Image: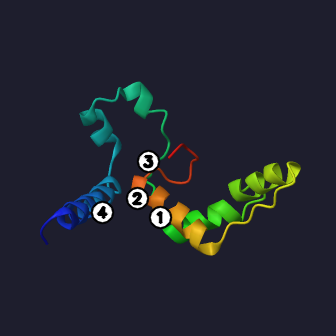
């Protein structure tokens, strides 16, 4: 692949390889990385998290009792405005969040 698509694909592959490597991390690896033994001793379990899919992000935006879409709809209702998110809009929000790699936490942008 040539051009900008090649860069994106290379980054995606590097992220996948990084995640696979991190799944095998041991306390000794943290020592080698520079963490002090007193800190590592307080970590009973080491674990990694996989990136959320767009479907999972849409679910987080809509399903929980305190979902952001529900909160914004209530805020707008207080002003007499009906706010409705279309499925396409939710997918676009999830796509942008996935592209930034920030997960489900709300942030500007």
**Residue at the spot of label 1:** 95
Query: Along the polypeptide, which appears first: circle 1 or circle 4?
Result: 4
**42 lies left or right of 65:** left
Label 4, label 3: how many angstroms apart (C-alpha)?
A: 19 Å
Residues packed near mark 2 inside 10 Å, few (<14), some (14 to 19) or many (20 plus): few
Label 2, label 4: how many angstroms apart (C-alpha)?
A: 14 Å
Label 1, label 4: how many angstroms apart (C-alpha)?
A: 18 Å
49 vs 108: above or below? below
**82 lies left or right of 36:** right
Question: Tags 1 and 2 in contact by the CB under 8 Å rule?
Answer: yes
Residue furthest left in the image: 2
Occupied quadrant, residue 15: bottom left
Front residue of this view, candidates 31 and 99: 99
Observer-side mark, 2 or 4, equals: 2
Question: Tags 2 and 4 in contact by the CB under 8 Å rule?
Answer: no
Label 3, label 2: how many angstroms apart (C-alpha)?
A: 26 Å
**Residue at the spot of label 3:** 46
Front residue of this view, candidates 81 and 56: 81
**Residue at the spot of label 4:** 16
Question: Residue 75 shows which numbered tag?
Answer: none
Q: Secondary structure at mark 1?
A: helix
Query: Along the polypeptide, which appears first: circle 3 or circle 2?
Result: 3
| Residue 44 image position (x, y, % from top left) | 50, 42
Observer-side mark, 1 or 3, equals: 1
Q: Secondary structure at mark 2?
A: helix
The residue that appears at 48% across and 38% down in the rendered structure is 43
Occupied quadrant, residue 70: bottom right
**55 lies left or right of 48:** right
**Residue at the spot of label 2:** 99
Query: Along the polypeptide, which appears first: circle 4 or circle 3?
Result: 4
| Residue 3 image position (x, y, % from top left) | 15, 65
């Amino acid at each position: 692949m040539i051009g900008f698509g090649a860069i994106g694909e290379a980054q995606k592959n590097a992220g996948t390889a990084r995640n696979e490597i991190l799944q095998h991390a041991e306390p000794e690896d943290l020592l080698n990385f520079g963490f002090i033994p007193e800190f590592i001793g307080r970590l009973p379990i080491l674990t990694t998290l996989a990136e959320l899919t767009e479907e999972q992000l849409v679910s987080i935006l809509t399903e929980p009792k305190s979902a952001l879409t529900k909160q914004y709809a209530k805020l707008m209702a207080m002003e007499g405005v009906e706010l409705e998110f279309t499925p396409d809009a939710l997918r676009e929000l999830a796509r942008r969040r996935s592209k930034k790699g920030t997960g489900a936490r709300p942030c500007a942008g």
